[in-house]
Image (tube, helix red, strand yellow):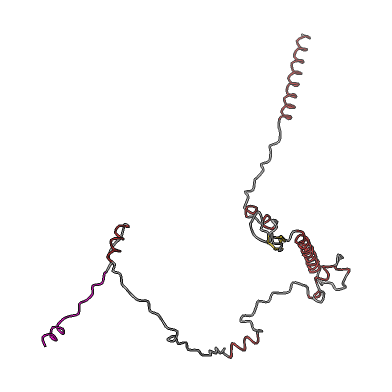
Amino acid sequence: MSKLDDLLSKKKTVVPVLDLSRSNIQTIDEFKRLFEKVPDYKMRPVKVRAEEIKIREKDYAFKMPKKEMRKLLRANGEREANYIYADPVPSEMKDVVLMELCAVPIDWKMLTTLRPKNKQEEEYFSRMVEMGKLELKTEARDRREFALNNCVKKIKNKSGIVETRLMSCESCGEEMCCGKTCGDFNYDLYIRVEARVVKPKPPAMSSNKAKLNGRKKSSVGTKIKVKKSSNKTN
């Protein structure tokens, strides 16, 4: 009985937990001292068996509300209706295909009998045809340039296999760049430049002064001559 009493009377010893929350570490030596006090907890990693893993496989079906479904059906599957811009082509010229007029190197007035109502609309439409012709010219130029220098090189290796490589630009370092576009759109070319105001030069007054001086001298000389002549008579 005495042994049972001793066992029951014994209190469980509380394991002291190291509390380092209030410690202020400022040097490496202090950190090492505190790190030595930290006990090494020998804990085994918990291993989960494949049999214990349970996945609830269920076929989920997300149902769309009927109102949203009707909206999508009305808008051809688009959640928000796209903003519709106004057509800049005059109403009289909508039956004409613009790119067909641009493809022919003839004035568009010779190709169709349709005309806009106002002179302003006619000028606007002719401007649109001109812009379309310029667009086709630039596309043809780009195709020619790409055919000459397409930035793709085919090289044979030592084993005789042909490899295709994309060449990078020397100026910007980007692939598929021939060095023209990056040279045209540098940031340095579009920095604000201070406008230099050229001051107008004052007109030269030296010639006028000389003329005036000459006149004055001549007038003085005449006066002196007159006086001399008067003295001789006396």
In the image, residue 167 lies at what x, y percent? 68, 59
Q: Residue at x 76, y 12 (%)?
A: 228
Q: Is residue 193 left or right of residue 2?
A: right
Observer-nearest of 224 and 158 = 158
Residue 5 magenta: yes
Q: In the current view of this chain or complex, which residue is farthest to the left?
A: 2
Residue located at (65% from left, 53% from top): 189
Residue 59 versus residue 187 in the image, above or below: below
- Horizontal side of residue 212 vs 67, given as left or right: right
- Determine the residue positioned at 65% across, 87% down: 73
Quarter location, residue 46? bottom left
Which residues lie in the magenta part?
Answer: 1-18
Q: How many marks?
A: 0
Query: x and y percent of residue 212 in the render?
Result: 73, 27
Locate residue 92 relative to residue 79 in the image: left or right.
right
Residue drawn at x 84%, y 72% is 115
Image position of 197 with respect to 92: above or below:
above
Q: Nearer the viewer, residue 212 or 161?
A: 161
Which quadrant would residue 109 be assigned to in this image?
bottom right
* Quadrant position of the C terminus in the picture: top right
Q: Which part of the image, by quadrant, shows the N terminus? A: bottom left
Closer to us: 117 or 28: 28
Q: What x and y, as percent, mark residue 159? A: 69, 62
Coordinates of residue 12 in the picture (x, y in percent): 20, 80
The correct choice, above or below, for 86 with respect to 8 in the image is above
Q: Is residue 32 magenta?
A: no
